[in-house]
Image (cartoon, grey):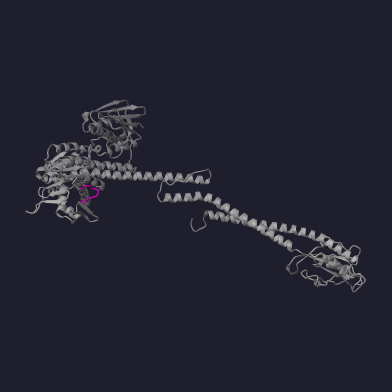
Amino acid sequence: MARVLLVEDDDGLREALGLALSSLGHEVLGAPNGPVALERLAAGRDVECVVLDVMMPQMDGFEVCRGIRRLGQTPVIMLTARSEPIDIVAGLECGADDYVAKPVEPRVLDARIKAVLRRVTPTAEPEGEASVVDLGSVRVDTRAMTVTKYGAPVELTPTELRLLLEFALHPGQVLTRQVLLDRVWDYGYLGDSRIVDACVWRLRAKTEDDPARPSLIATVRGVGYRLDLP
Amino acid sequence: MTGRLGLRGRITVTVLLALLLPSVLLSLLSYRALRERAEQDFRARVLSSALSDFTSAANSIRAQVKPNALLSAHEALAVRKFNTYVVYAMKPDPSGTGYTAPDPNELPGPDQDPKTWPGLKATSVSDASVEQISSTPLRAFLKTGDHPLLLDERDLVLVHPAGKPWLVVGAVVGSQGTSDRYPGAPVVAVEYHSLQPVDDEASADLRSLFLVSAATVVTGALLAWLVAGRVQRPVAAASAAARALGAGDLTARLPVSGHDELSDLSSSFNQMADHLAKTIDQLTRHQARQRQFVADVSHELRTPTASLLAAATALEHPVTRDSAATLIAPQLRRLAALTEDLLEISHMDAGEATVVLQPLDLADLVADAVAHSESPESVTVRTAGDTSAHVDPRRMHTVITNLVSNALCHGAAPVKVTVHEVEDSVVVRVADSGPGVPEELHERVFDRFVRADPARASGHGGLGSTSNGLGLAIARENARLHHATLTLTNEPGAVFTLTVPKR
């Protein structure tokens, strides 16, 4: 179904989780540590999703995640042994798309992988409608799935792109965190709204002139976010 | 300070009361002494002035200044304006043998103007009545004959007509002439000297004394207030510090100055606070350690659990079933080993670990541990001297097994084990050929869930207790139960040295 790179330092867990994901239809590549994983990702662009353990010797998951982001926009799901909020936030802020806590039910992981991958697939837009949304300095092509800022292409992860599209398709409308979780992350109750905040934060960093004073995506305190057209 | 008096107020009030009574008593005693002295002075003055008055009156009668003896005496005394006086003549006794003294009640009051009172009464007085007169309030000593002016201080009489004190003094100043009503009858002059000025002076003195007393009391109270303040300030500071300490500010301390009881209190308080802070710090650390331990345990449980969950999922698919089946046993062994180790540690923590000592050759234990290790061929054993000691076989076996396993797992082969006798101990050295353990971790490797090697042990999921980070902790705890020491050095590979006392 998808080619997954599983980065996990515990041999037993890597092997077992690899088998489980294979049995659920994924093609699994294993990597025992960060450097090996980054090497594999640099070697070819065929990996569709990375499942990344946080607690690893030599190079921890956060560092590996930043390395992955330097290489490209491959979706990353963090595999955390500690579900402390600080670990989750740190993981999301360094560019991860999602996270699951150990011990993870393989089917949940499978669902998360599928959800992340769906974001890469473009949404079908009705024919004849304008495919380019003009947001001032930022332009979003909803069919080609490309984003430009002052004419220069902006690299967005699938999750970030889906999030921006969601905003672009509903300008001036307040989108609650729950709605965004449902539409972008594709799951409801499982989600943690901090995932939305972290992703909006990253999106602002890439699209806003001054991320500290956003002009595009406004925060509606206590409710959610709203895209303001210029 | 609360609504109550407070320490300072109480000290002040106590001093105030303590000063008040003696001051008042002292004032009253002083007043009495002063007053007596003033009265004596006054008596002396009265005596001398009366003597001269009466002399002058006697002279006046003798010189017959007026035809009437009473008038002559009056004339003489009238010149002395400052006195209130009366002049009278005694009545001849009806028996004709003497004269009677005047009835004191018939005498004019001293506040009566002598000019409006003729005072020319004559009475006769007998010798027998002299005593009678002297016992009356008017103790003018009456004498007849050649020495009419016998006067001494005893003749001064204090009377209190209408509540006012007067000194009364009298004398026979002459006898009536032939033209008088009772010729030959003695003429008596009496002077009244008011004691008012003495009283006034005494009251003024009393006022001054009371003022001095009041000043003393107030000054004393003021000083007490100030001194109490000096005592109270440190006490208040101590109370504030105690409150702060009670509210959780463990840095609250008191300044210590001088060598008095208050500085003793301050240093005792500080010692208490230090002790308290230390205890709380220890408890906090202990709690943090406990929390860390629980977090570590749950983390350590998560990986095999996750592996088993994943393997269980893989078992459902025919393609992955066989591979998955082989993964289950090692993970279960890992869980079982962890459970055993946790149980062992919890026994040790609870102080329930029992040690059954029996004589045993440690070389045999080492040989057995090596034979059951992961790769016996990578381990060489050398023995020298008498290597038997009194040990708990199971526990000592655990120590040696953990050390050998640790060397194979975290160090590098070949591993050299030596067992030899040093004085009263048996020393077991386990040396590996790895890079050694960083100096700063030498003590920490014996802590629970601490792994020194950068690659960690997690790659060796099924290899036994050493891979969960508890092996060395258990080894050291067991060594401690034998009063043995377990230390780590780098030479340059990691060398664990176990020194077991023979008895």
Query: Which image quadrant is residue B166 in?
Result: bottom right
The reply to whether residue A112 is in sight is no
Residue placed most toward the observer, A45 or B361? A45
Q: Is residue A65 magenta?
A: no
Position of residue A93 relative to residue B156, above or below, is: above
Q: Is residue A209 magenta?
A: yes
Left or right of B123 on screen, residue B451 = left
In the orientation shown, which residue stands out farthest toward the left?
A: A127
The N terminus of chain A lies in which quarter of the figure? top left
Q: Residue at x 49, y 51 (%)?
A: B236
Residue B16 appears at what percent x and percent y?
A: 59, 56
Residue A150 appears at what percent x and percent y?
A: 16, 46
In the orientation shown, which residue stands out farthest toward the top?
A: B384
The reply to whether residue B59 is in sight is yes
Position of residue B63 relative to residue A156, above or below, is: below
Residue placed most toward the observer, B300 or B380? B300
Position of residue A156 relative to residue B423, above or below, is: below
Q: Which residues are magenta?
A: A208-215
Residue A33 appears at what percent x and percent y?
A: 19, 38
Q: Residue at x 48, y 46 (%)?
A: B266
Query: Which image quadrant is residue A47 in?
Result: top left
Left or right of A41 on screen, residue B497 = right
